[in-house]
Image (cartoon, rainbow, N blue to C red):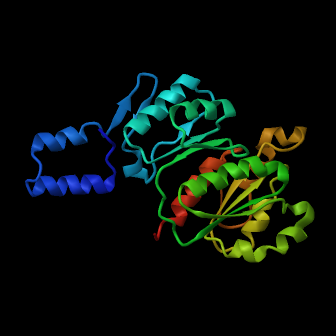
Amino acid sequence: MRILNKEDIIKLLDDYKQDKIDLNGAISQIKSLPYGDLGYAKIDHHRAIRNGYPEVIYGEGKAISHIQGIVKHMLEKHEKNILCTRASREVYEAIKEVTDEAIYYDLARIVVVKREEVEKPKGKIVVVTGGTADVPVAEEAAVTAEVLGNEVVRLYDVGVAGIHRLLSNVNILQEANVVIAVAGMEGALASVVGGMIDKPLIAVPTSVGYGANFGGVSALLCMLNSCASGVSVVNIDNGFGAAYTASMINRINL
């Protein structure tokens, strides 16, 4: 039995109302909605209905066999699109054994099984980085945002050490509906960009930097203490979280 989306449930209720389906038939279709229990994982079938996108698989730390089982279950339930973050190439190869539709984004460490196009909102999400070393986290954000159906513009290596690089691209930043600023070291990029735009900015501190960077803590604290208005901060290296929030903002008026 496949997973029901919001439109399916509306049709099911309408069919029941019009006596096109009996009560037992309706219950049979709805009963698998809460979650699928695999023992080692409980797959949330309601996620897309509540949040707008199916449950995302966090690949790091999971057994390969468990990831394969989760993907297989989601495919059997006709989940339209599957996203696995923090995935190694080994994880990708394992998912390829389950479905040849899997695509691997090496820098982002993301596996995508895309079976359906997602309706695109009009606004753009701009992903900007302080340096090239921040690109893997930025790509996690950019690829996630694209899979969620957004148009993404990448603006990389425009940090404050050469601020003229940023200033020459202000027009790109100002055309965005949401900006994701990804930076390590002292994390000043978020404040600088935040002062240039009238749209929400989601700051992502990265673990890029030398000893006193404390694995991204210095950038995190700098961003949390930003004097620019409209700056929100996610956890260190959390490109996925930034993209998911940016996508929700970008789709508000869809």
Q: Position of residue 102 (x, y in %)?
A: 57, 42
Picture layout, residue 74 above or below residue 13? above
| 156 lies above or below 81 | below
Residue drawn at x 72%, y 59% is 181
Q: Residue at x 51, y 32 (%)?
A: 98
> Hey, which residue is sitting farthest front in the picture?
100
Residue 253 visible to an observer of this rendering: yes
Query: Residue at image x 68%, y 41%?
Result: 109
With 42 as the anchor, is 90 left or right in this view? Answer: right
Q: Is residue 184 visible?
A: no
State the residue in front, 191 or 238: 238
Q: Position of residue 18 (x, y in %)?
A: 9, 58
165, 120: nearer the viewer: 120
Instruction: Name the quadrant of the N terminus.
Output: top left
The residue drawn where x is 53% and y is 29% is 67
Describe residue 140's horizontal placement relative to residue 184 as left or right. left
Which image quadrant is residue 177 in?
bottom right
The image position of residue 100, as x and y in percent, is: 54, 39
Q: Does residue 243 appear to the left or right of 128 in the view shown? A: left
Whole-percent x, y for residue 125 in the image = 63, 65
Q: Look at the picture and state if 194 lies above or below 9.
A: below
Corner quadrant of residue 77: top left
Up-down: is 162 above or below 244? below
Along the horizontal axis of the image, is 165 left or right of 143?
A: right
Give the total of numbered labels.
0
